[in-house]
Amino acid sequence: MLRYIRNIQGDKVIWGIVIILSVLSLLTVYSATGSLAYAKNDGNTEYYLIKQLIVVVAGLLFMYLIHLVKYTWYSKGYIIFVTFLLSIGFLAALIIYGLTINSAARWLPIPLTGLTFQPSDLAKPALVMFLAKLLANNQDKIKSLKIYLFMLIPIILICLLIFPSNFSTAAILFVSCLVLIWIARARMAHIGLTILAGAAFGVILFFLIMHYPKAIPRGETWKHRIEVWLDDSKADPEADYQITQAKIAIASGGFFGKTPGKSTQRNFLPHPYSDFIFAFIIEEYGLVGGGFVTLLYLTLFFRIVRIANRCKGNFGSFLSFGIGFLIVFQALINMGVAVGLLPVTGQTLPLVSMGGTSLWFTAISIGIILSVSRGLEIEAQEEKTSFKISDNLYATV
């Protein structure tokens, strides 16, 4: 065991943040699933704790194994191409064979296992890897409109495939990719035109949702969510029950919270262990706990930006920043929904919400970032060693 611990490299702060969030995940899932356990597992409250523990431990193992791989391996053309094609294949299959859970068809069944996964969880890091490779290979031509349009093609393709089942994920991924292209110093005029085109698309989509909701997938659901977000008086006591209970949970948490295990809203909030887990955290740990969790994600992003800035190669820099921004952006969206700043989106809180494959893909993504950080440490050690050899040779002469 000690040998494996010694092999852990990469940014230690990121490792610490991941471990803290993993422990928080176990505590909150165990506390939040009490009512669910009595409803579906004869009161066996340990069932979901053990299940989440297995998921978390497996995620940490995946992260450890991934971080041992040299990050330049992820830049290999066949790895990126195969991963990208798999993402397209799974997203296309989702449109035909997707399972509807909680009114959304976002899951594909895994044969012979009884498990499901969201293809978008694979598509997110796959697209970022693909885009990071394109940006790294075309840095000298990044100002070209032709190259810019060429980079937009895979982004639009993946986002359009995700859009029918998960509009919020498609939007988050599209914005994250644009930010990454901006970081790569593409022309602001090109990015500005893309933003204008996206805004025009958003206006048309908003018009269709509000006036012809049946014309687009889940249009009626989005229309209702937007109306409630704009005007609380239009909330339906039954349809918007979860939003109302989340607000009660936040209001009753106060500054220091009710302390772990003493939540009352877990008996009323339909999904306190997934989409609205941040509201549950505030109820039990208060504004202090909620603020601490927010600080953890912001610190995570700061450390990732630090890694990206230290990279000598463009690919490692773009890869770590793109994946990191995507994870933290999703976390902020989840928090914004929980506190009522944004309409309900169905986004989970990375590394904290109860789940299987979504947590695993997040852990794998962070493992890739740690692989970049580990590569920087190895390069620094090699440079230090080479300097010592040079000094010794100089002294000998």
Image (tube, rainbow, N blue to C red):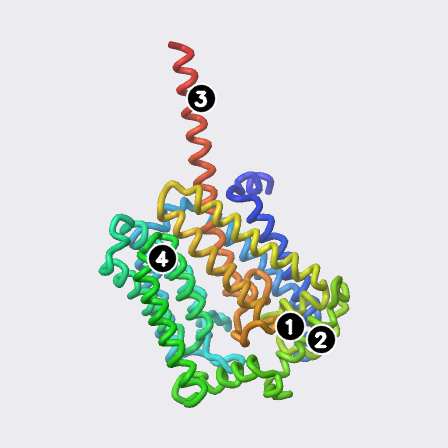
Frontmost residue, 225 versus 277: 225
Q: Secondary structure at mark 4?
A: helix
Residue 285 bears which disc, if any?
A: none
Q: Secondary structure at mark 2?
A: helix
Q: x and y percent of residue 386 in the render?
A: 41, 25
Residue at which label 3 appears: 388
* Type of amino acid at the residue the image marks with label 1: Pro
Q: Are marks 3 and 2 in contact (CB under 8 Å)?
A: no
Measure how far apart labels 2 and 1 are at the Cα level.
8 Å
Q: Which residue is mark 4?
A: 181
Position of residue 323 measured from the top left corner of the image (x, y, whole percent): 44, 56
- Residue type at the position of mark 4: Ile
Does residue 77 appear left or right of residue 119 in this picture? left
**Earlier sequence position, callout 2 versus callout 1:** 2
Q: Nearer the viewer, mark 3 or mark 4?
A: 4
Distance from disc 3 to disc 4, alpha carbons, whole Å, reads 39 Å
Q: Tell me the CA gap for discs 4 and 2.
A: 42 Å
Q: Residue at x 25, y 52 (%)?
A: 141
Mark 1 or 4 closer to N-term? 4
Q: From what the image shows, is residue 354 above or below residue 100?
A: above
Label 1 sits on residue: 272
Which label's residue is closer to the chain start, 3 or 2?
A: 2
Residue 175 percent coordinates (x, y):
42, 65
Give the mark, 3 or 1, whose residue is nearer the N terminus: 1
Q: Which residue is mark 2?
A: 265
Residue at 52% over, 85% down: 224
